Amino acid sequence: MPNIPTPPAQRVVAGGRALNPRQIAQVLSRYQGPEQFFQQPFTALDSPVLPNNINLNRPMESIEMWWLGRVTIAGANYAAVAAEAPQTIIQKVILQGTHKKFNQIIPINMTGATIFAWPRLFQEKGNSLIINGVMQPELSVPVAQVPANFGNIGTYDLAIQYTIPLAVMFGPAARRSMNYFLYMPQDWVGQSLQLQLFFGDATSFGTPAGGTTVTFSAFGSAQGQPQVMIDTNYAILGAAANKISAGVVIRNEQSLQGGSLSSIGNNIRIAQLQKQKTTNVVLKTGVQLTGSSPSVIVFQTLDDSVLERTQIIVDNKPVKNNNLNIIAKNYAGRQFNTTIPGGYLNFPFVESQTPLTYFRGDQVSGGSNFEIDSDVLTNTGFGTFVQEQVLGNPMGLG
């Protein structure tokens, strides 16, 4: 049989060089699984910067955290339980470091509740929440905590998973595309990656009644402190690691534009977007819980009816047409084989399961508007959004 050369279109190339079959296998990679990095004691309303910087001696795919502790509610039931309790106990996570090309950057700045929900937006299996040994159902519609499940007088041993994918999330069949967003040791200045956690308190779970007392202790015990276990997941790429042109994914959660949800109206600009390559734009709407501690921000309810006909706009023209949010929401769910949780709305640009199709926001001209516009149906809403951006040229893309 003649030796037929591989057509050029089928050759795998990284860093401008063709890869042999062994190197191709390395590009497909396998992960090493969670590797313990640090254990941080929990103190209510503390905001510790982890004393150890993340060890970036191999390509890193994700950071995984587990909040493990006991919450004892006594005296009286909570008057109101936050929609995303108890995962609201971690209020915010910031990951920052010094990149050789982009200098000092903050790739992750998100609330714990949104980090918890993020994987569910892109795959059937989301983060895990285990209450008293019982795995809780996946986030769905609506998102609401039942007081009898958590919030009434009782003792609750909690195991809460927070997975932070460092890459754009694709379906399992396209998992190899994530390799082009791994944190490569050669791309960062030394061991400069630093993690900071912001903890909540009893008001993170909702509104305590007048006689409610809340005690935190170690998992399975009435003594000690809860702990946050932090693991890192590395990829084994071998020699191929030095041939991959990796981009950096940025996820910074921000409040929707001040005052934009305070009055009912049509075609209201609710957020300005950064002119960067964009893979997903995720909005989260509902009603903010009042009476929380000053540094605590949580949703009392998550609600899909705050906004309608939400669109990504460039110079008054929609990037994707959307006439009803329920259609856009369920389209995104179908593309990623998942259920988009209540209150969340995703506008994906990578439902193709490849970064080749991200929206080139970096090519929007300087004088043009790049924004989120929407009809606002209620004047009591509160919202945040995440514009998932890409810095650099993954896969050698322009």
Image: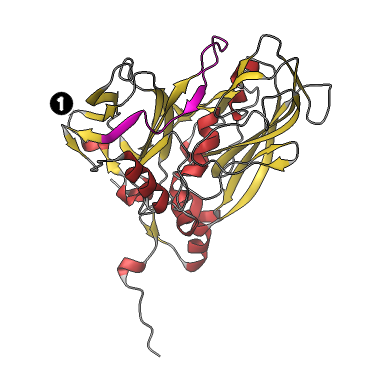
Question: Farthest bottom residue?
Answer: 1
Q: Position of residue 105 (x, y in %)?
A: 43, 27
Say which residue label 1 marks: 367
Within 10 angstroms of label 1, few (less than 14), some, or many (20 or more) residues? few
Q: Is residue 78 above or below residue 60?
A: above
Q: Is residue 199 left or right of residue 288?
A: right
What number of labels is visible?
1
Residue at point 40%, 90% (across, down): 1
Nearer to the camera, 244 or 385: 385
User: Which quadrant of the figure has residue 228?
Assistant: top right
282 left or right of 231 in image: left
Residue 345, placed above or below residue 43: below
Where, by quadrant of the figure, is residue 305 drawn? top left
**Residue found 43% across the figure and 48% down from its top:** 180
- Visible residue check, residue 28: yes
Taken as a whole, is the magenta stretch helix, strand or loop? loop
Identify the magenta region: 289-311
Q: Residue 123's spot in the image, x, y percent?
A: 50, 49
